[in-house]
Amino acid sequence: MSPQFVAQDAIQFETGGRRYEPGILNIPGIAGMLASMRLLLDIGIDAIGQRLLELRGALVDRLRPLGYQPLLDADTPDADRRLSGIVSVSHPTRDLAAIVRELDAGGVSVSLRHNRLGQAFIRFSPHFYNTDEEIDRAIALMQS
């Protein structure tokens, strides 16, 4: 309640960036963020990190026999410090844009990326809540 509030005859927006500042806090967003942070802390950051590396390994192990090549391999020097759950793969002969469309149609979210030379990569970014079955579904879509 705002007892001293008097509505303006005309809205006068701020100039510059202040024009886009919110008028009130995003309470539902803050509550959701708090719940997310509690979930992450309850599970544990180290456990989440380990799960991400397990998912990464599962993706790479299943994609390699299909001819996909990871952009960053676990055998790369200092890989233990640089690996994350994100996996980007290329393929010497497959149309990666078509595969991305197939994955999207199958409900698998990935991103088609290109390096500075124009080479295409499929970028996976699983999180700890993804399941082995979801990885299997992505692999099955990439085999066709």
Image (cartoon, rainbow, N blue to C red):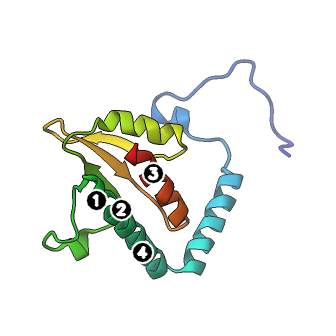
Report, in whole angstroms, how far the alpha carbon at label 4 lies from the one at label 3.
Answer: 26 Å
Residue 22 in the image: state x and y as whole percent: 61, 41
Report, in whole angstroms, how far the alpha carbon at label 4 lies from the one at label 2.
Answer: 20 Å
Q: Is residue 7 visible?
A: yes
Q: How many other residues sit within 10 Å of disc 4, few (<14), some (14-19) or many (≥20)? A: some
Q: Amino acid at mark 1?
A: Pro
Viewer-side residue, 15 vs 4:
15
| Residue that carries the numbered disc 3 in the rendered image | 140
Which badge, 4 or 3, comes first in the chain's sequence?
4
Query: Is 103 above or below relative to 97?
Result: below
Q: How many other residues sit within 10 Å of disc 2, few (<14), some (14-19) or many (≥20)? A: some
At x 24% / y 47%, what residue is drawn?
90
Report, in whole angstroms, how far the alpha carbon at label 1 lies from the one at label 2.
Answer: 6 Å
Query: Is 107 above or below relative to 45?
Result: above
| Residue that carries the numbered disc 1 in the rendered image | 65
At x 22% / y 55%, what residue is drawn?
71
Q: Which mark is residue 50?
A: none
> Contact (CB < 8 A) between labels 1 and 2?
yes
> Contact (CB < 8 A) between labels 1 and 3?
no
